[in-house]
Structure formats: structure tokens, C-alpha cells
Image (cartoon, grey):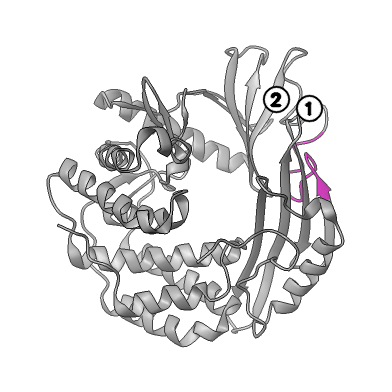
Amino acid sequence: MSEAPGGVGQVFPAVEPASVLYPVVQRLRELVAADPVLQRRPGEDLRAELLPRRRSNGAVELRRAYWSARRPDPASAWGITARTLYLDGRTGRVSTHDFPDDPAMDWLAGDGGALRGHGERAAVQVLRYIPLRRVTFRLTGGAGLPPRVIAKTKSAEGLRRAFLALSAAHAAAAAAGSDFAVPRPISLDVGRRLLYLEELPGNPLDSRLDDLGLEPAMRRLGELHREVHGLTVAGPPTLTVADWLDAAQAAATQIGILAPSVRAALDAVCGRLRAAVPADGELAFCQGDFVPGQILCAEQGWSVLDLDDGHLADPHSEVASLFTALARELPVPAGQVQGARQAYLAAYTARAGRWLDPERWRWFRTVAELRYLARRIVKGRAVPGEAAEVLDGLAAGPDRPET
């Protein structure tokens, strides 16, 4: 099944006409069609979100929606230009924002904003922009900082959590003598909503598969993931099986609102999940969003990035999440995905010294499939029919880990 493109007519393509929010999608499609800047061209970045929720009385409401196109721009002070179309679910008001103007992050722009005020010689290169949430950028020549650092800006509370999580993970990796690196936090400036980190060498794993080789890279990824799970990290929050069940049911609610034709199948899947909830068991440190794009590969070693959402959880949860995501996160032909998955699993279990538990695996794989499907629909990445295809696969039962 192909990936949803970003052109006109492909704005949230998996949202069905029977959805109560379909009129919102139609409105967004008209607005995107009227603005060429919002239409993605080949090789450019697109981010989108259509975030519904169901109230306690059963009514459906839209929390927010946005559609944002970003493109490289060497003439810009930030290295990019980006335009975001934003729909406020509370008021119904639509607004358009050109970066660094943002619908929620009002601290980005201006002389005292997070992107400015680093000194006359400072240069900013935006690496990642997620509207309403965060910006990650490379800062060169910042006053009072190393020559090059990575900086993040997001909400003040989010930065505090990120600083504590990253500090704890960096200390744990150093204490364990890990053969992978974790960025060292340099400083936290809550007033300006900035977290400065050391810049580590390398390129994302998903961009290095041709020269590393797919299966060798996946085997190293499996070994690395097990090393991360072996860290003793102080203070992260704990997610229990009850939390994962809640997350799966929340994902099912979102899917059912946006793709109502699959509600019966969703009810059946969630019923099976509730009937088979495993007991809480082993806990391991989990990175929180462990995908190939979060791994830097360099000749001197590999690094794990973005530990802001690190937590303790059953390791099956993160292994299942990565296994599920690899079908979309690896830029390889579909016929090579299963071999890549099994190479990763074989290396992970070999490093762990034991197999995954089949029952826990099936349960967490189902949770992961629901959460990943909801994310793809909400982010406008799913294609028509994808929800039915995923749920048909779950009805047949998630695959067993090969042993």
C-alpha cells in the first residue's frame, strides 16, 4: 500500500465521508487548494494533524487541526521556510502562519525569542519543526556555548522533563560504559525555553542503509536496542499494562471517529485486548520513540537521540512498537521489510539471552498496531483502506516472533 502524498485532494485521505469530521477535512482541502505554498513538492517535508476526541457524553469534537509545508531555503535566516494552516477546534477560527510565527509557540519570533539573541556571530539551521510542539536547530557560534550545539525549544515544562530525562540517560550510559552515545545536556534556559545539547556525529540510520547493508544494520539496531533496555536510569516515569491498554483504547477511539466503517472490528480487537491483559512484569528503560531516524551512525560509533520521553516499561512494548513501525520507517521495498524485522529481532533476543514471550508479544503487537494506525490517520499519512487492512491483519492474529 502506497504512502499518502501531500498534494491537493490528499489532505487526510484516510478520513471517511461518513466521519462526523469529514466536513472539516473538506474545508481544509479547499484551503490547501487555494494556497500553492501549502502544497508539497517532491522531496519536501509535510506535517499535518487532525486531532479528535470523544467527550464523556459521547459527542465528538475537534481539538485542533493543522497542515504545514516546510521546504529548504538557504536565503532564510533559519535555513527553511514553512507555512502552517491552523484550525482552532474550540472557535473554528482558521489562521495562516509563516515560520517562525507559530499557532502555539509564541516565544519563537522576536528579538528575544528562542531563535534569536545568541550573539552577532550566531547562525541557526532548523533541523526539525513540529508545529505547535517544538523546534530543533543547530546553533553555530552561539555566545557562551561550544562552537556548534543542538538546541531544542518547546514548552517550559516539556523542556524541564527533557533535561531531567536526558541527564539521567546520559549518566546511565556513561556509568554502564555503553558502546553507544547519548547527547550530553549542556545547559537549560527555561526563561527563553531553550535546551542546549552537544552535537554528535553521524547521519540517521534510515539514510545509511545502502552503505551499511540492510540486514547488518538491523542486527546492529537490535543489539543497540537491547543495550538501551539494559540501562539503569534514575527517575523516569513508569508505564504499566493498564497505561498501554488505555493508550490502545484511546487510539481505537480516534480511528473509529475518523474511519467509522471499521468500528465493529475495533470493538472486537479492544475486547480481545481487555480479555487478555498480561500481568505487569519486567521493566526496562525505553527511549520512547525508538525508530531508525532517532539513531545516528558514524564511523566512531552509533548514538541514540531524543530521549525526552524516556520511561520504564515492559520491553515488549518498545520492541513491538519498533517492529510495527519498521514497515513504514524503512525506505526499502516492501518485500525486504520482513527480513529486516527478523534480523532486528534475532539480534535483540540474542543479546538479551532469551526469546520474547509469545503471549506478551501478541498483546503488545496489537497495542502497537492500533497506536501506529491512529497516528498515521491523525497525521494524514494513512491511505484509504489502510485501517481495514490493519484490522484484518489483527483479526487473523499478530505474527509470532520467530525463534
Q: Position of residue 123 (x, y in %)?
A: 71, 20
Residue type at mark 1? Ala
Tell which of 304 and 164 is nearer to you. 304
Is 54 covered by the magenta stretch? no
Q: Quick one: label 2 or label 1, which is nearer the N terminus? A: 1
Taking the image as drawn, is residue 279 in sight?
A: no
Q: Is residue 350 above or below residue 317?
A: above
Name which residue lies at 42% across and 47% down. 288
Within 10 angstroms of label 1, few (less than 14), some, or many (20 or more) residues? some
Name which residue lies at 77% across and 67% down. 28
Q: Position of residue 179 (x, y in %)?
A: 29, 26
How far apart in space, not on screen, are marks 2 and 1 (Cα)?
7 Å
Q: Which residue is mark 2?
A: 124
Tell which of 383 and 186 is nearer to you. 383
- Residue farthest to the right, as pictured: 34
Residue type at mark 2? Val
Q: Position of residue 325 (x, y in %)?
A: 42, 56
- Could you tell whether 104 is left or right of 94 in the image? left
Helix, strand or loop status at disc 2: strand
Is 107 covered by the magenta stretch? yes
Labels 2 and 1 touching (C-beta < 8 A): yes
Q: Which residues are magenta?
A: 97-109
- Could you tell whether 279 is left or right of 87 in the image? left
Quarter of the figure that contains the C terminus: bottom left
- Could you tell whether 354 is left or right of 257 in the image? left
Q: Is residue 107 above or below residue 182?
A: below
Q: Which residue is mark 1?
A: 77
